[in-house]
Image (cartoon, rainbow, N blue to C red):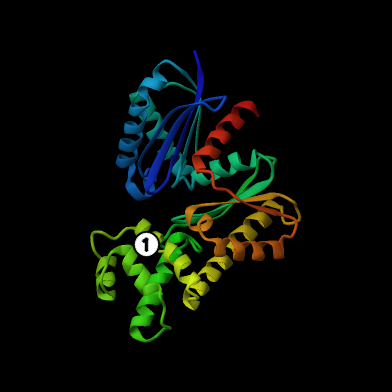
Amino acid sequence: MDKVILAVDGGATKTAVTVRKHDGTILFEGEGEGSNYQTVGEGKVREVLTGLLSDAQDILSDRQVAIGVFALAGIDSKHDELVVRNLVEEVCRLRRLQIGKLIIENDAEATMLGATGGKPGALLISGTGSIAYAHDGKGDIFRSGGWGHRAGDEGSGYWMGLEVVRAIFKMEDGRGSVTSLKEEALRELELDSVQDLAGWLFGPDYAVDSIAKLASVLNVCVKKGDGIATNIIEEAADELALLVSSVLRKCGLQNSDCDVYLNGGALIHSEMLITELEERVKAEFPLCKLITSTKAPIEFIVERGWLELTG
């Protein structure tokens, strides 16, 4: 009977699942809605995972699942881990799925362990949210950020998107400089006016990921020479550099030549943000190497699973 890995990458807006052989052969891939229980609720997580594992049932039924890695956003404490573990185990029982070894952990932590191969290093993610993890290579893991959009996630797509909206309102009031962000943001959201934007913020179509998508208009406006857009990206770089700095120092890697992996759509799709971030991090930690990764997190989560099995 073939031994396979089941890997799940669950974020706030979507969940990816893959089943693979150890040689990398992909037996199944699927995608569903978000599975961060803190944002969508336990019932929705149960529904999403049940649906995805049902889709993979034919592949899993005649194969031994050597390891299952459920890397889900929202696992930020022991209580969170217990809640999600109960959910995952319930769904696996429902689908009559037996897994040799089951790993349930924060999605960013799993991605970091897979990216670094268990060696000393760090991962910075700036997508809808922002978070940094570091590993000392001896089993100790440290984290900075990831506190959520209501009070944190500085330097993330959501944070930058919100800064875009604020700049537009300031321009409209005459409290801020004229910026091309207004035109580009309204086009992105398919709105006609700033008044429509204000209404949208409190309407049924508002969503955190929609605000995060506004970060993409910064790149367009920077190319036009827009000073406000440039300032927002520079401030985002400041915040992300602080995440990297704090987590490397917590981990004792400040004088190390470790790798720092960069991931997340808001970061890897902004050439200026990467450049500004690299300047700040290298100025403080000249020995470290920043690696921009275009791999999907699920690829690193698969690596994290095999690493657990092979040591």
What residue is pinned by disc 1?
211
| Left or right for 104, reference 293 | left
Residue drawn at (48%, 54%), measured in percent from left and top?
A: 265
| Left or right for 212, reference 280 | left
Q: Residue furthest top?
A: 1
- Front residue (pair 59, 178): 178
Residue drawn at (37%, 86%), measured in percent from left and top?
A: 174
Q: Residue furthest bottom?
A: 174
Q: Residue furthest front?
A: 224
Residue drawn at (52%, 68%), measured in percent from left and top?
A: 233
- Front residue (pair 258, 188): 188
Q: Position of residue 125 (x, y in %)?
A: 53, 53
Is residue 146 something one can see in this rendering?
no
Residue 20, above or below 42: above
Q: Position of residue 31 (x, y in %)?
A: 37, 38
Residue 257, above or below 185: above
Q: Position of residue 311 (x, y in %)?
A: 65, 29
Q: Quadrant of residue 288?
A: bottom right
Is residue 20 something one can see in this rendering?
yes
Q: How many marks on residues?
A: 1
Q: Which amino acid type is marked by label 1?
A: Ile
| Left or right for 301, reference 62 | right
Residue 183, above or below 40: below
Element type where label 1 sits in the image: helix
Residue 93, above or below 29: above
Q: Position of residue 69 (x, y in %)?
A: 49, 33
Packing grade of label 1 (10 A; few <14, some 14-19, many >=20) is: many
Q: Quadrant of residue 276?
A: bottom right
- Front residue (pair 40, 128): 128
Residue drawn at (40%, 75%), measured in percent from left and top?
A: 180
